[in-house]
Image (cartoon, rainbow, N blue to C red):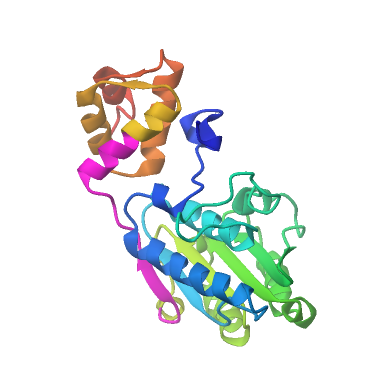
Amino acid sequence: EKPVHVMGTPQSYRVRSFKEFIGNAEMKAYFLAVLASFLLARQTGVNPLPKGERVMLMGESRTGKTEMVNLFLQAVSCLEFNLESQSLCKLPCRNCAYNFHIDGDAGLFAEFSALTCSNLVINHIPIDCTKLTSAAQLKDYLALVSDKTIASQGTTIVFMDECHRLARWNMDHMILKAIEQSQAFFILASAEAGQLEQMLINRCVVLSTETAEPDEFENWIISISNQYDIQCEAKAVIALGKKAEYKPGLALNCLTKAMRLGGVLTERIVQEWRKEI
């Protein structure tokens, strides 16, 4: 039986299990620990997610930060998440079929959504900092975070992606205030640590991305290729790992090219891909 994500191309690949991630071991362990406490507390009906906790994910683009958070949000809301297999349900249920990062950014202020799981309510507020056009817009988002009515409904999770795109003034005067005064669980992600305000970093648990070992990455390329019926030359697999700098997101781009150009990953395709690099 093929996995549910073999439709489309490798660029549309989405993980449905934490075991599918390569590298990023510390980041994965962190989110699984939060999930474990959540699933245990779900049985008692006690509000399970951390209140007032802040975590900063740092690492280069295409290394899996956003995908990790998206899977975590899906797992929190999945009605049948299996901690042993670290997988979402196979249905999938309505909750874990939702793409929190992409679907959540569909409207101006329609991002706020409440997901009910076993009498527990999770309020999710995604903020894509690449799409913010003004400080006033950011202020409106943060007003949702501090809204007492929303907070009283359950746990609020705020995911701020590409937070390095914020102006330093906004980091100092708006974000710091929000995370210090709110009981929301803040998840921030950045590809540019040097552009972040140090005071913001100092208030977060910092987790840095980690690339996979070459052998692990090559096995992952073969596994993804099999799911999309792509044949691989052995030398091309090794070459792709090096050319992609062991970043999964980049490798998926090249595999999509191979799929469209005959369904075979060859050394020539890898060499021609990102030729300017």
Question: Is residue 184 left or right of 201 when viewed as pictured?
Answer: right
Q: Position of residue 173 (x, y in %)?
A: 58, 80
Q: Position of residue 186 (x, y in %)?
A: 55, 72
**Who is closer to the viewer here, 128 or 104?**
104
Rendered-image quadrant of the C terminus: top left
Furthest residue in direction right, as rendered: 149
Q: How many marks?
A: 0
> In the image, is residue 241 above or below residue 110?
above
**Who is closer to the viewer here, 247 or 233?**
233
Examine the image and state in which quarter residue 131 appears.
Answer: bottom right
Q: Which residues are magenta?
A: 202-221
Q: Residue at x 41, y 47 (%)?
A: 20
**Who is closer to the viewer here, 239 or 84?**
84
**Who is closer to the viewer here, 78 or 145?**
78
Report whether residue 244 is seen: no
Q: Position of residue 67 (x, y in %)?
A: 49, 51
> In the image, is residue 252 above or below residue 47?
above
Examine the image and state in which quarter residue 269 appears.
Answer: top left
Q: Position of residue 200 (x, y in %)?
A: 46, 77
Question: Is residue 254 left or right of 240 when viewed as pictured?
Answer: right
> In the image, is residue 150 above or below residue 112?
below
Furthest residue in direction top, as rendered: 262
Report whether residue 120 is seen: yes
Examine the image and state in which quarter residue 27 appears.
Answer: bottom left
> In the image, is residue 211 above or below residue 262?
below
Question: Is residue 211 located in the magenta-colored stretch of the structure?
Answer: yes
Q: Residue at x 38, y 28 (%)?
A: 225
